[in-house]
Amino acid sequence: MKALQFRHMLLAAAALAAAPAIAQETQPQPQPDEDEPIRVGEGVVTVQPIAIPYMPTPAATDTPAGNTQALGQQVAQIVATDLGNSGLFTPIGPGGLPAVSFPQVEAPDFGAFSSTGAQNLVQGFVQANGNGTLTVGCYLFDVSAQSQLARQGYVVQPRDWRRAAHRCADSIYSRLTGEGAYFDTRIVYVSETGPARRRIKRLAIMDYDGANHRFLTNGQYTVLTPRFAPDQRTITFMTYQGVDQPRVMVYDIEGGRVRPLVPGGAMTFAPRYAPDSSRIIFSMAVNGNTDIYTIPVAGGTPTRLTNTAGIDTGGSYSPDGRKIVFESDRSGSQQLYVMDADGSNQRRISFGGGGYATPVWSPRGDLIAYTRTGIFQIGVMTPAGSGARTLTSGGYAEGPSWAPNGRAVMFTRGASAGQLWYVDVASGAVRQVRTPLGGSDPAWSPLRN
Amino acid sequence: MERTARIGIGAAVAGHAALLVLMWFIVIRGNSELALPPAMEVSYVDEVGPTSTSPNPMPAAAPPAAQEQGPVELAAPSPEAGPAPAAAPSPAAAPARQTGGQRDARGSGEVSRSPGLNLNPNSFGDDPQRAPGAPAANYGPGQLRSLRGAIGAALDYCRRQPLPAREAVDIHVDYRVTLNRDGTVASAQLIRVTNNDPSLERYETRMRDLARNVLTQCQERVRRAVLQYPGWDEAPANWRQFTYQFPRTN
């Protein structure tokens, strides 16, 4: 056995000595790997120039919404504005671009647009149909590849011509960014006017870009924190109607009826819908303690989800309905917590200085938006509490609401005369949404049906 | 310690000492025998793409009658330049890469056309038009790397594609390209989309667009780069095929 060990050691020493010589003899000459790809650049995050000429009509026709020739110009303008508002595109046109004839809609003169620097081209048409509807055609082309990337047609009633334009912009946005659509949406918010001590707050609804604005309440009572139901059939909000303490109400959009969410005189506030629109989560003060409850939208007995000393409020469901994020001052300051939908497994996820309030779970599920109450800015973090970052800067900002694609957040800016703004979470680009009066508490609707 | 163990240790020490001496000898001797090619003089130019990066540039090819920078649709594969089997240089051609004459030619900036190289044109398997015994360029691995470098430099002009989101840079798209003999694109085939993050799937379609646009927008630069490459007109079929990836992995 020992002799065997000795022979092994000698052999190992000999192998060590011979190794370099063997390696020198057998090492292959380097050969080019023909399958090794040529690696090209890394891309850039930048706004994309996109050309959007006026949209022609096959036959100028008068409709209740206007002449189809004029509508073609307005549709192109709306598409350009929507894409520009996203912060991801630099629209070129419609003014100043070569006129597009109806036959050219499907066969663009790419040469005429290549000099604009646009990588993509949007063309379309507006046509009046015999049955009184309008068809809006929408085409997306790649200028350098001279290829068609997308095409959509929308048949709408004349009154919905703006929606067709938004849908066109949505299809372009989704095709070029990979993100979900969000232009064909509405905003419900609190319209504010008058001096601070006698402020009139009315519920108002409008398209995401401020068009088609109308008031839902007349200002006889104060309204706060409106929220869209995911099925877009109702709106819930808080009001001081007829009582001294706040109550959560449910507004039927079609019928215009309003009813209290919880019968009786309990103080209820901070409502928000479950993703399937079946329930509303809200806060209720009972015996001086505020906890989070949930109740079917149709009514019933509230189910308490939290039971701690202090104020638990601002509940918001995760998109799958299995988790809830909320704010609580149980630790001595306003912080964010996550729990299961039945109230179990409560854990704190924010630990920064100051306070965190009004959390809202992203429709995509990856982020939670909130208000930093110490500095009054909008921020986002993951549901685990990591990756916290501030989206806004300067001014007073609060009350975030997610766009249905989870990429943009609308919020209120300004402590007194509020304005509505939204920010692209990825690029940080911000845009203001014009309202006839001051505005606060925006709630972004889902994508319209 | 037992005797056998002591012997073993002694043998190991002696063996290592012998090994060190042997390695020292090999290194010194090897250095003296390795004949490195003479240093190649290089110069830098401001413009990269349109000028060949080959060490022995040929006279520039005549400009094509076609539009210089205009968008050109990726052409369908032509019968002449269809995806030919990637015929690797045959063993008959391989020794030619090692000839001193070619190294000299590379250093002097001239293309070796010596019939003494005795390259068998049929060994490249794709050029029936070339007459047997016709002069041949150097088609070694170094030259292929250089050609790929020239193509890469041409494509890199179009690297600034607008990403749909910052994290989309983690999606990598590979295209396989076949060029015609005249340097134009015969075919471009999507062969792979690499994405390890399911949450980024929504960006994949757009990233395929952008990777394709790299070639579409820079195919004229690629054409000029390869036409200026020495021996391009007689290069093997596999030289006219390459794969590129956008964006590159870091």
Image (cartoon, coloured by chain):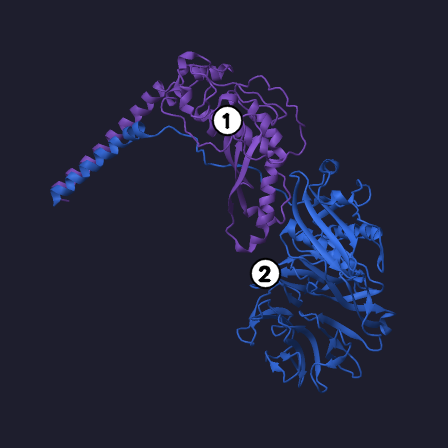
Chain colours: A blue, B purple
x and y, in percent, of residue B11 in the image: 18, 35
Q: Is residue A168 above or below residue B235?
A: below
Question: Where does label 2 land, which residue?
Answer: A366
Relative image position of residue B95 (x, y in whole percent): 37, 21
For the point 58% across and 41% down, the residue is B211
Element marked by disc 1: helix
In this view, B96 is above or below A369? above
Q: Quadrant of residue B227?
A: top right
Amino acid at pointer 2: Asp
* In the image, farthest residue toward the bottom: A264
The residues tagged by marks 1 and 2 sit, at their Cα atoms, a distance apart of 45 Å
Of residues A422 and A449, the one drawn nearer to the viewer in this rendering: A449
Q: At 57% across and 20% down in the image, what residue appears?
A: B43
Judging by the rendered image, the residue that carries numbered circle 1 is: B146
Circles 1 and 2, Cβ within 8 Å, touching? The answer is no
Q: Which chain contains the residue that carries disc 2?
A: A
Question: Is A82 on the left-hand or right-hand side of B71?
Answer: right
Which residue shows up at 77% across the image and 66% down it?
Answer: A440
Front position in the image: A410 or B182: B182
